[in-house]
Image (cartoon, rainbow, N blue to C red):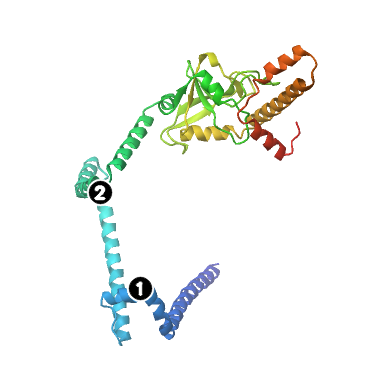
């Protein structure tokens, strides 16, 4: 058994030596090839500026290629020695600092030492920043730091109220008076008196469908803070509990009588991300299909009734009812439906 192990070890060492020797032979071959083709290589080095750079440092000897090669070799050798020395000093200092920093007193001394060393650089940077950075840029940085500080010390609802504009109920109804479409995640936020947060979806206000009556509909979410950027999405995370009112159905009526609506053209990144996530949920896609098909079908039927009914009373009812079918994006939705080949 020992004999077999010794043979295997010898074979392993031989292979390693062969690989090392092969790398050395390849390098020697490259050097010989470079020396043989030196006249063709020099123009390339001149084109990239390497020859002029070495000449400025006095490393090029006209007509004395051996001296040029020797001087370049010595510079490379000295640089290698410098890196070795610096690496050794770094290792020694690292060991010393780790020993000193292992105790509380040593850590305090080490911290003071680092601060004293860094203080001149900090002062120089502050002076440079004050002199050369425009005042507008400094003010913008200050506002950004203040914003981050306020977010770190505020609740999610406080952040909404700080960054979003409060709008009236009528403004909310007008803003949402459109037919929902795939990819449309421009929702409103609504906060109840009990600090419940709703993402309110687009919908023609007076439209009744099989599952969604007149009014506004949305999904309720519970917002809670995270520790820092725990989930990589910012200072807080939005959790959704859609089953609280209607088991198995997340989309629910929005209590308009006890809610305040908020809107912003520049939505907070966490809320924007969550809105986009909502727009791809299966239940929201079903909501889109039902609102679209019901709206188009009902309006088409009303227009047909108005055009052909002989009954004056039914005619007047249809005229009054069709007034509510005024979604702002109706024409676009109809074109989308036609392009998809869907028949209502």
Mark before the other along the chain sequence, 1 or 2: 1
Nearer to me, 219 or 227: 219
- Residue located beneath label 1 in the image: 49
Q: Nearer the viewer, mark 1 or mark 2?
A: 2
Q: Is residue 101 left or right of residue 322?
A: left
Q: Assess disc 1: are there few (<14), some (14-19) or many (≥20) residues with their C-alpha within 10 Å of its C-alpha.
A: few
The correct choice, above or below, for 40 with respect to 110 in the image is below
Foreground pick, 179 / 233: 179
Is residue 288 in sight in this rendering? yes
| x 72%, y 23%: residue | 298
Question: Could you say which quadrant of the image residue 280 lies in?
Answer: top right
Separation of marks 1 and 2 at Cα, in angstroms: 33 Å
Residue 307 sits above or below residue 71 on the image: above
Residue 132 shows which numbered tag? 2
Name, please, the residue furthest toward the bottom. 63
Q: Is 55 on the left-hand or right-hand side of 278?
A: left
* Label 2: few (<14), some (14–19) or many (≥20) C-alpha neighbours in 10 Å: few
Q: Nearer the viewer, residue 92 or 119?
A: 119
Percent coordinates x, y for residue 287 in the rendering: 65, 27
Question: What x and y, as percent, mark residue 270?
Answer: 48, 34
């Amino acid at each position: 058994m020992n004999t077999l192990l010794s043979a295997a070890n010898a074979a392993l060492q031989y292979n390693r030596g062969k690989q090392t020797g092969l790398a050395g032979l390849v390098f020697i071959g490259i050097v010989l090839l470079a020396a043989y083709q030196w006249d063709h290589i020099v123009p390339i080095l001149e084109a990239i500026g390497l020859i002029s750079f070495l000449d400025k440092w006095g490393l090029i000897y006209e007509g004395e290629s051996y001296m040029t090669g020797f001087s370049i070799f010595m510079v490379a050798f000295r640089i290698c020695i410098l890196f070795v020395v610096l690496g050794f000093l770094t290792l020694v200092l690292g060991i010393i600092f780790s020993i000193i920093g292992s105790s509380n007193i040593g850590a305090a001394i080490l911290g003071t030492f680092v601060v004293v060393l860094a203080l001149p650089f900090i002062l120089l940077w502050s002076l440079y920043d004050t002199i050369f950075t425009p005042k507008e840029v400094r003010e913008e940085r200050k506002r950004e730091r203040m914003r981050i500080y306020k977010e770190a010390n505020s609740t999610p609802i406080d952040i909404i109220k700080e960054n979003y504009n409060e709008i009236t109920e009528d403004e909310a109804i007008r803003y949402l008076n459109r037919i929902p479409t795939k990819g449309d995640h421009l929702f409103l936020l609504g906060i109840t008196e009990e600090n419940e947060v709703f993402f309110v979806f687009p919908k023609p206000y007076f439209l009744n469908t099989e599952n969604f009556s007149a009014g506004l509909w949305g999904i309720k979410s519970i917002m809670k803070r995270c520790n820092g950027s725990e989930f990589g999405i910012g200072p807080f995370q939005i959790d959704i509990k859609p089953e609280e009112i209607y088991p198995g159905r997340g989309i629910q009526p929005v209590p308009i009588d006890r809610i305040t609506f908020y809107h912003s053209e520049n939505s907070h990144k966490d809320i924007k991300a969550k809105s986009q996530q909502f727009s791809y949920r299966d239940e929201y896609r079903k909501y889109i299909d039902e609102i679209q098909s019901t709206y188009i079908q009902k309006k088409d039927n009303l227009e047909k009734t108005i055009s052909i009914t002989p009954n004056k009373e039914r005619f007047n009812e249809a005229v009054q009812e069709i007034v509510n079918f005024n979604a702002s994006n109706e024409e676009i939705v109809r074109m989308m439906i036609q392009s998809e080949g869907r028949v209502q």
